[in-house]
Amino acid sequence: MIKKLIKVLSIIFLLIIIIIFYLSFIGIKTNNFNEKIISKILETNKNLNLVLKDVKFLLNPYNFTVKISTNNPTIVLGSNELQIKAVKTNIFLKSLINNEFSIDDLQISTKQIKLNDLILLARSFKNSTELFLLDNIIEDGFLTADIKLKYDKNGNIRDDYEVNGFIHNANLNFFNQFNIKDLNLEFAINEKKYNLTKIKTDFNNIKLSSPLIEVAKKNDFFLVKGKILTEKKTFNVSQLNVLFDGLIKNLGLEKAKLSSINNFSFNINKKLKFKDIIIESKIKLDQLVVENNYINLKSYLPNLERLINFKDHRVVLNYDKDNLKIKGKGEILIKDKLDSINYEIVKNNDKFKFNTKINLKNNKLLIDFLDYKKKENLDSTIKIKGNFNKDKTINFDLISLEEKNGKIVFKKLNLSKNYKIKSIDSFNFDYFNNKKIKNQFFLQRNNINYSIEGKNFDATKLINQIIDNNDEDTFLSSDFNSLIKLKIEKTYIDEVNFINNLSGTLNFSNSKINDVNLEATFNNNKKINFSIIKNNKQEKITRLFTDFPKPLIKRYDFIKGFEEGYLDYHSIKTDGISNSLLIIDNFKVKEVPAFAKLLSLASLQGIADLLTGEGIRFTDFEMKFSNNKGLTTIEEMYAIGPAVSILMDGYIDAKKLISLRGTIVPATTINRSIASIPLLGSILVGEKTGEGVFGVSFKIKGPPKKLKTTVNPIKTLTPRFITRTLEKIKKN
């Protein structure tokens, strides 16, 4: 009996083992539980319907659960059907026996389904803002995924879910600004992190790829970081701004041919607002075209065109929140000539810092105000360091030019927004200019004042600019208030003539010269003094005196062979109007072409020959004139000499129009006229007069290069002419 019992129990135990083995490894298929399974699974979402075929049950004897799986089910959501590859879940065995389902987890493997259908399914569970935005952003695309969900005891999905899969040929549109086409990637998603790998797409017609992009949930934001690679491509300015999120829109970029490796990170909230953007890009730049919008460099680089070309550059771009840093090196193409350049640009809000080094060999360089020209094929190094400010002012920490035979260095040069000098710490000039004159002098700042000292200074160009500059335009900003002390051993006033030991002071107030006191000597020990002072009436009084005026007169082309004499210039300026008196005494000229022409037209050939021959002496020259906003009015110009005398007035309108009229009379006529005056004539001239000729009146009018001259012989001198002559004779 016992043996039979043991045998029966053994058979039952064996059957149980076989059943457990069968249920664990082979399982059973049935649709008897479909309705209960469907109703239990869909308890979490009443809007869904699940169509199941045969369901397979597999026993897990270790944790007393039953693994339930089905192939090719369909999820129905309204009129949309989602084709599922397989659904698997675990149910506690006790729940199954008691006909009480308690799902432990749910595994769903999808077929290729539309992304919009997936978003629709997700929104049926939880209709969040981000899902709504995604539904509007996604235009097309497919997804294949393996989804693992776990449920708590209350039947709710736990946070430790996992989703893995692929996205194929997705198209996205971000508010008509960013377009993503043909997006393909692999993804692995859990509650804390999204990993996107093997990404390839077309972003605003730019082909991009990425080995990895990570999205991590952080409080109310998502932290996104990863790497993006761009293939070599020619980009226009709009594509560049999109690629770098508009960070370089103010740099004047026109187009570029490049490839890049870009590491990035940023935070994005649930409303898709970006913050804390960080970008690091390594760019291989075959070509970059930049429009120069900041400084007019054409006057310095004559070969330069509107667009600047950079070739074969290696560039590192870093953007950290509001700071942009660009560092690179390569070649710069100016017209058809290549030179090399290193540069660093840092942008902080509206302020740009720059640090540039240019090795300039093949291109010309002109610095007009320094009368400097670098020829082609001469090695030079230019360094420029400073910043552009929000108010459009420019601060140069350093501007230097170094070559084999010289250097030009500026330090701490600050310019206003219209490129006027606000201040400068120092400059040092040691170079040969275009006239082969070596400039050797330096400037040093002391608080708000300056000193300029040196061995040689070619002031020719500066003097020409001062003479030609009637409107008192200045290279100084309106708030420049400083005293400048001068001490220069040799100062050239033209290519040949120079003065020695130039010393004195210049006092500037609001960029205008308030007072000046300068003195120097010529090589023949003749002196020159120049001063400007302001009196109590706020009148600016200018005085220039020299007993060697020849170098100063020489610069006027219409006077040839000026010799001897002394020059005294006196001017008073009030409210922008100057009244001046110029006196030159005891001088002679060899040639005055304009007056020689007048005399020739009037048939006074003897005096004309004198003016173009050995020279003609004048004992006195005076000119009274005024200047107001470019209009020079000559009240009277009078010159008297043993051979000829001249009286003239008129005006000159800023090089546009010249209008002069006057009288030229040989000295014999003057003598005869004055001698005819009772008593006074015999006293001033004497009883014996020479044989004279008639004088002439003349008019000169027209543009400077198209003057027309008319003459008219006169038989009787004007009272004004006689009066001025008498005054001069009395004085002498």
Image (cartoon, rainbow, N blue to C red):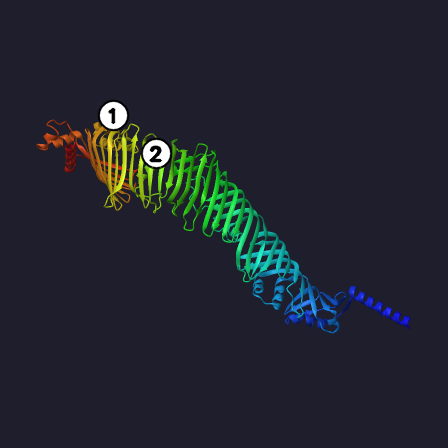
Horizontal and vertical percent for residue 603? Answer: 21, 30
Q: Residues within 10 Å of mark 2 (few under 14, many from 20)?
A: many
Q: Name the kind of residue labelled 2 in the image.
A: Ile
Picture quarter containing residue 434?
top left
The N terminus is located in which quarter? bottom right
Q: Name the kind of residue labelled 1 in the image.
A: Glu
Horizontal and vertical percent for residue 423? Answer: 38, 44
Is 619 drawn above or below residue 74 in the view shown? above
Residue lying furthest front in this view? Answer: 2
Q: Residues within 10 Å of mark 1 (few under 14, many from 20)?
A: few
Is 536 drawn above or below residue 131 in the view shown? above
| Residue beneath disc 1 | 614
Horizontal and vertical percent for residue 381? Answer: 47, 37
> Position of 255 compared to 624: left or right?
right
- Nearest to the observer: residue 520 or residue 642: 520
- Kindly tell me whether residue 715 is visible in this rendering: no
- Nearest to the observer: residue 176 or residue 351: 351
> Position of 620 compared to 485: left or right?
left
Residue lying furthest left in this view? Answer: 679
SS of the residue under disc 1: loop
Numbered circles on residues, count: 2
Horizontal and vertical percent for residue 86? Answer: 71, 64
- Nearest to the observer: residue 203 or residue 730: 730
Marks 1 and 2 close (CB-CB < 8 Å): no
User: Tag on residue 488?
Assistant: 2
